[in-house]
Image (cartoon, rainbow, N blue to C red):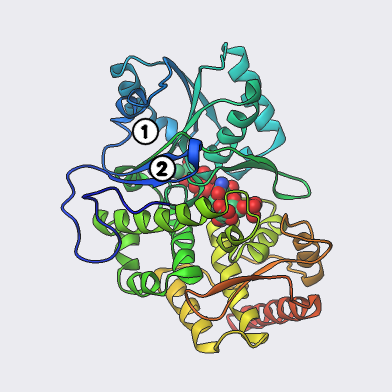
Amino acid sequence: MSDPLPGRGGAEGPEPRRQGPERLRVDLGARSYEIAIGPGLIARAGAEIAALPDAPSRVAVVTDSHLSDLHLAALERSLSDAGLAFDAFVVPAGEASKSFGSFEKLCEALLGAGLERRTWLIALGGGVVGDLTGFAAAVLLRGLNFVQIPTSLLAQVNSSVGGKTGINTAQGKNLVGAFHQPRLVLADSTALSTLPRRELLAGYAEVAKYGALGDADFFAWLEEHGPHVIEGDAAAQIRAVATSCRAKAAIVAADEREGGQRALLNLGHTFGHALEAETGYSAALLHGEAIAIGMVMAFDLSVRLGHCRPEEADRLRRHLAAVGLATDLADLPQVDWNAERLLRHMRKDKKVHEGRLTFILARGLGQAFVTRDVPEAEVLALLQDVIAASALGRQAAG
Ligand SMILES: NC(=O)c1ccc[n+]([C@@H]2O[C@H](COP(=O)([O-])OP(=O)(O)OC[C@H]3O[C@@H](n4cnc5c(N)ncnc54)[C@H](O)[C@@H]3O)[C@@H](O)[C@H]2O)c1
Ligand SMILES: O=C(O)C(=O)C[C@@H](O)[C@H](O)[C@H](O)COP(=O)(O)O
Ligand SMILES: [Zn+2]
């Protein structure tokens, strides 16, 4: 990842005067691309796409049933204004659309509409639409260009960048997919104004992740300004999105296919994906909500293994709770948690290596590391203790 383009501000120092969107670059050689962050980008998307060197004359927009009522019309207007022909495809909102069934329907619909190799796909939506559309782009006609227009906080700070695409299976989360980079990412900050608060909070968990895994100064900034991000302060949101994207782009540029350090971005995910599997990828537990709890578990495990001071884990838990995120299983609607079952889900994780689980642990806030040196008995003990504590918490609450 290069420095911000000349004249654009970073996360540090005084706020830059904003003349246009903040522009970052993901440096991946011939597959490099730009991330633009700022207001009004959906309304300018047509012009942004048309300005790319090998711009298409036709695009297919994929969105979900919430976004189709909120932001699709503005995108369609901008495509028309830029002279781009388009079709639109709407999938049901929610994690269930990251499934074989939805993927098949989407591919059939796209092919049925006369997709060609020169057609670009556009993902307008959250991480679900982005992951699903990106995967379709990776495999349809053996590979199409696609553009990410992320509309949830989670998608703007994370899923739209880095090229991980895919769907869930009965065996686990994101188990079928491909690395396929977008050609452009347009993160329109005004879109966040229609995002429900619960979704904003879930996305915030992935913002805090960047501080927790590698940037203690950003974490400290979030402790002060996180509430502004949640309350909808546009400047705070843009800064949080830009800092997150810069961190992710740097990691992806160094290790695109997760041979090593990219796994840091999985902080909280070994636990979190197991929690999502156990709740059936349903609205009972959103991805970001699972990751908030998963990060706390990863820090608690780090403390138990002697890597991290308890004060650091407490600080993470306090901050997530302060913005309104659940940090413990006891905070969730009742689920019949079972430690062995959670461990079985974790054994399906893509990071499993020669039968050993991989964890992202931490020496403190901003100091995460990747390790396979974690006895399963310790993980099981942690899960059993967390589940017992959540049962006690529930009893005490009556
Ligand atoms: N590819 C990656 O690197 C990566 C990274 C993180 C997460 N993910 C995946 O992303 C998914 C979660 O993404 P998500 O949290 O965006 O979920 P999502 O796509 O389901 O979006 C959340 C909800 O918010 C709605 N929504 C989105 N933008 C809106 C807006 N501007 N206004 C009103 N409503 C809006 C959606 O319709 C949906 O109901 C998970 O499947 C997760 O595994 C992928
Ligand atoms: O981009 C990455 O790399 C990440 O790990 C980002 C995660 O936040 C994201 O949830 C990702 O989809 C998880 O990937 P997986 O390989 O664990 O399925
Ligand atoms: Zn994630």
Q: Nearer the viewer, residue 5 or 215?
A: 5
Residue 162 is situated, as x and y percent measured from the top left of the image, at: 52, 46
Is residue 104 visible in the rendered image? The answer is yes
Left or right of 80 on screen, residue 274? right
Kindly identify which residue carries mark 2. 151
Residue 264 vs 75, above or below: the answer is: below
What type is the residue that disc 1 sits on? Answer: His
Quadrant placement of the C terminus: bottom right
Q: Secondary structure at mark 1?
A: loop
Residue placed at 65% from the left, 67% from the top? 334
Residue 11 is situated, as x and y percent measured from the top left of the image, at: 30, 62
Residue placed at 61% from the left, 30% from the top? 136
Residue placed at 42% from the left, 48% from the top? 156
Answer with mark 1 or mark 2, whichever residue precedes in sequence. Answer: 1
Q: Secondary structure at mark 2?
A: loop
Q: Residue furthest front?
A: 29
Mark 1 Cβ inside 8 Å of ligand 1 = yes
Left or right of 360 on screen, residue 20? left
Label 2: how many Cα within 10 Å (few below 14, some 14–19, many 20+): many
Residue 253 is situated, as x and y percent measured from the top left of the image, at: 50, 51
**Where, by quadrant of the figure, is residue 3 drawn?**
bottom left
Residue 119 is situated, as x and y percent measured from the top left of the image, at: 50, 18
Mark 1–mark 2 contact, CB under 8 Å? Answer: yes
Residue 388 vs 320, above or below: the answer is: below
**Where, by quadrant of the figure, is residue 15 drawn?**
bottom left
Kindly identify which residue carries mark 1. 71
Is residue 286 visible in the rendered image? The answer is no
Residue 338 vs 198, above or below: the answer is: below
**Spatial CA span between label 1 and label 2:** 9 Å
Mark 2 Cβ inside 8 Å of ligand 1 = yes
What type is the residue that disc 2 sits on? Answer: Thr
